[in-house]
Image (spheres, grey):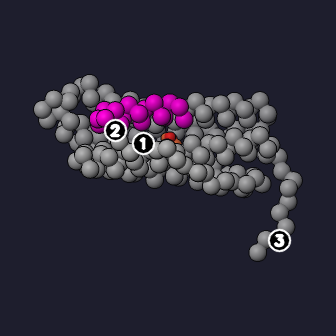
Amino acid sequence: MKTFITKNRSLLDETEELLNKQVELEAVSSAIYLSMASWCEIKGYENSSKFLYDHTEEEKMHMMKIFRYINEAGGHALQPEITGIPNDFSSLRAVFEEVLNHEIFITKSIHSLVDHCQSKKDFTTFNFLQWYVTEQREEEILARRILELFDIIGEEGLGLWTIDQEIGKLGTAGVSSVISGAGGGV
Ligand code: OFO
């Protein structure tokens, strides 16, 4: 058992706080997508549901990468408290519009964190965050591709059923099917 923890570190308190804030945002992402997955499941959108259940796990992984980084850098990663997650959505399209809006919000948060690290010359954390910069580009592209399905296919008749099938294919093929030069997961 560890009896001595050194406090000597290069990680600034302010950066630690911002990283913990990002942990919280990734946990919120995971929780929102879990709620959306459940809503899709009870409405019969099986493929969208699976896509979102998978995405919930993906967001948890995003959270854990930062969580572990904070402690490895000599900080204290904090378990976030998540409340206020919506459980109801007006339509399948509304679900994926919310996914895109949320991902744009997360991108802005990552960019401001990167900007902070650059201004403080914390190049270690800056380098660590580059994975998230790439990931957010992919997340936004995928969400936009899904929303395009609603316009291309239309929601009348078998439209929603077909859209759900196509979302399933995007989930299986992963982001590399819609993006050139993709290296990561969904
Ligand atoms: Fe963590 O990328 Fe979505 O939110």
* Contact? badges 2 and 1 (CB < 8 Å): yes
How many labels were placed on the picture?
3
Q: Residue 53 at x, y = what percent?
A: 38, 51
Front: mark 3 or 1: 1
From mark 2 to mark 3, how far is it between C-alphas? 49 Å
Q: Amino acid at mark 2?
A: Phe
Q: Residue at x 48, y 34 (%)?
A: 102
Q: Residue 72 at x, y = what percent?
A: 72, 56
**Observer-nearest of 60 and 28:** 28
Numbered disc 2: secondary structure: loop
Numbered disc 1: secondary structure: loop
Q: Is residue 104 magenta?
A: yes
Label 2 sits on residue: 89
**Observer-nearest of 56 and 41:** 41
Numbered disc 3: secondary structure: loop
Q: Main secondary structure of the magenta part?
A: helix
Q: Is residue 34 above or below residue 4?
A: above
Q: Which residues are magenta?
A: 89-106
Q: Amino acid at mark 1?
A: Pro
Q: Is residue 172 magenta?
A: no
Q: Amino acid at mark 3?
A: Thr
Label 1 sits on residue: 86
